């Protein structure tokens, strides 16, 4: 499972770069068209917004896997190994609950908006809300993998607290 999640996150990074390039091309091209020719592509604004949402969720999954999200550890740093493990387990359980909330809410919105089309692209709005479904499932898988390592005792004390870099 660990190798599968690793390769999945690598693929998400590549997809994120591709989405970013497409998004930049759409926005930049639209700006040039508006200023140079007083003409713009309406669908470019909508698609770039949707790509930004997907990009954000994909990059968040990869960042979660690499423990790159921001956090505070002024209390955790003062605890012993057992206290750190308990706090990390509680935090991951809460994050799993939030993943469930995001997944269930996004799934409802996706199903509700399946036949609703976006104003300029005529694409189903379900594609927009589907990003939350993908994130909820993917983030839960990453968190479950991390919880399994935590419960088996595979995590040393150092990754539980961020190192201070000055």
Image (cartoon, helix red, strand yellow):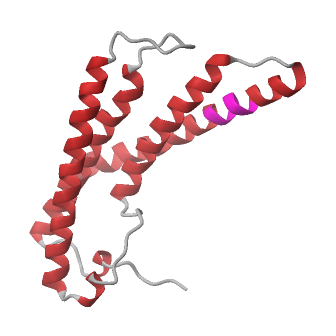
For the residue pair 105 and 44, the one nearer the viewer reads as 105
Q: Is residue 146 left or right of residue 71?
A: left
Q: Is residue 26 magenta?
A: yes
For the residue pair 127 and 58, the one nearer the viewer reads as 127
Q: Is residue 78 magenta?
A: no
Q: Is residue 31 left or right of residue 18?
A: right
For this orientation, the residue located farthest to the left is 152
What residue appears at the point 20 percent right and 61 percent down from the top-left corner?
92
For this orientation, the residue located farthest to the right is 36
What residue appears at the point 44 percent right and 11 percent down from the top-left corner?
117
Q: Is residue 75 above or below residue 88?
A: below
Q: Is residue 15 visible?
A: no
What residue appears at the point 38 percent right and 78 percent down from the top-left corner?
162
Q: Is residue 44 above or below residue 159?
A: above
What's drawn in magenta, residue-wise?
23-28
Residue 91 position in % (x across, y down): 21, 65
Residue 99 position in % (x across, y down): 24, 46
Quarter of the view holding residue 32: top right
Q: Is residue 126 above or below residue 14?
A: above
For the residue pair 64 and 77, the one nearer the viewer reads as 77
**SS assignment for the magenta stretch, majority:** helix
What residue appears at the point 40 percent right and 23 percent down from the top-left corner?
127
Q: How many numbered badges does the structure rendering display?
A: 0
Residue 9 position in % (x across, y down): 38, 47
Q: Quadrant of the C terminus?
A: bottom right
For the residue pair 137 and 91, the one nearer the viewer reads as 91
């Amino acid at each position: 499972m660990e190798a599968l999640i690793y390769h999945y996150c690598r693929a998400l990074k590549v997809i994120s770069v591709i989405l970013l390039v497409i998004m930049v091309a759409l926005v930049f091209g639209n700006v040039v068209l508006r200023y140079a020719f007083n003409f713009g592509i309406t669908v470019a604004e909508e698609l770039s917004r949707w790509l930004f949402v997907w990009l954000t969720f994909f990059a968040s999954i990869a960042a979660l896997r690499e423990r790159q999200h921001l956090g505070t550890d002024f209390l955790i740093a003062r605890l012993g190994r057992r206290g750190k493990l308990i706090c990390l387990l509680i935090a991951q359980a809460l994050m799993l609950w939030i993943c469930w909330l995001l997944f269930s809410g996004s799934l409802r919105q996706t199903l509700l908006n399946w036949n609703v089309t976006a104003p300029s692209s005529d694409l189903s709005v379900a594609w927009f809300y589907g990003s939350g479904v993908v994130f909820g499932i993917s983030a839960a898988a990453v968190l479950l993998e991390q919880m399994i390592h935590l419960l088996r005792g595979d995590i040393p004390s150092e990754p539980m607290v961020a190192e201070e870099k000055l």
